[in-house]
């Protein structure tokens, strides 16, 4: 089922499944996808499903609607297209996920390279993730924000979100759905416990909270 991933300044703020033939996007609370941002019009745009196609149409919004950096009035969306609505980036995804065993080695190496670029913080305390594989092995990423995204666009991106009871892992985008202790998060976010193992393709991470 197609879905939208809404983010501001690289931080994911919501995910929405397109369960209807016609889904409206806007600031007003009666929209199917509500984006509470002043740069978004009350009724900004609509996505109409036409068979296998999803057609985006601007509804005369004040600031316009863009797809992959180009202003559009009406546009048939392709998997992975990024809409710009106000200050928000809205990624359109057709496929929910695929088997992680099919991950191309170039994407795995790219993710490992991104993780290797993390600074080496002092021995940490508090919630964080530690890299267990590849060149980045031993690096740690402190979880100091309400939402921390990890991964590589188009391959596997996950969000570690602070909740009332700790942190949880959710799938954001990419063909390869992360798992926690071998359980896929495709069915919804999974609450993290100390020393839980997170898999993103062949890359392995460990969640630590002490």
Image (cartoon, rainbow, N blue to C red):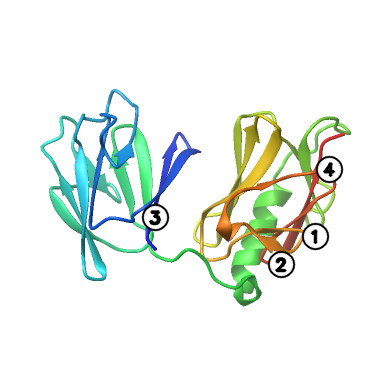
Mark 3 vs mark 2, CA separation in Å: 25 Å
Residue in the foreground of this view, choosing between 8 and 117 = 8
The circle on residue 202 is: 2
Residues at badges 2 and 1 in contact (C-beta under 8 Å)? yes
Mark 2 vs mark 4, CA separation in Å: 21 Å
Question: For the residues carrying marks 2 and 4, which lies nearer the camera in this image?
Answer: 4
Residue annotated with mark 1: 133
Label 1 vs 3, first from the N-terminus? 3
Label 1 vs 4, first from the N-terminus? 1
The residue positioned 64% from the left and 33% from the top of the image is 162
Label 2 vs 4, first from the N-terminus? 4
**Where residue 147 sits: x, y (%)?**
59, 35
**Where residue 36 sits: x, y (%)?**
34, 27
Residues at badges 1 and 3 in contact (C-beta under 8 Å)? no
Residue annotated with mark 3: 3
**Where residue 61 sits: x, y (%)?**
15, 34
Residue annotated with mark 4: 194
- Binning the other alpha carbons within 10 Å of mark 2 as few (below 14), some (14 to 19) or many (20 upward) gives some
For residue 19, what is the image quadrant?
bottom left
């Amino acid at each position: 089922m197609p879905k939208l991933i809404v983010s501001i300044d690289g931080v994911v703020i919501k995910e929405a499944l397109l369960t209807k033939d016609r889904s409206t996007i806007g600031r007003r609370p009666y929209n199917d996808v509500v984006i509470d941002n002043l740069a978004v019009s009350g009724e900004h745009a609509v996505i109409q499903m036409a068979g296998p196609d999803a057609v985006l149409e601007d509804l005369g919004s004040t600031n316009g609607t863009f797809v992959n950096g180009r202003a559009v009035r009406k546009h048939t969306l392709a998997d992975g297209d990024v809409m710009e609505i106000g200050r928000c980036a809205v990624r359109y995804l057709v496929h929910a996920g695929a088997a992680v065993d099919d991950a191309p080695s170039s994407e795995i190496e790219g993710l490992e390279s991104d993780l290797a670029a993390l600074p080496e913080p002092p021995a940490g305390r508090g919630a964080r993730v530690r890299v267990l594989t590849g060149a980045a092995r031993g690096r740690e990423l402190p979880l100091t924000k309400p939402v921390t995204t990890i991964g590589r666009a188009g391959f596997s991106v996950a969000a570690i979100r602070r909740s009332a009871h700790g942190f949880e892992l959710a799938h954001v985008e990419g063909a390869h759905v992360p798992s926690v202790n071998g359980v896929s998060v495709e069915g919804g976010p999974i609450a993290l416990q100390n020393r839980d193992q997170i898999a993103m393709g062949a890359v392995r991470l460990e969640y630590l909270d002490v």
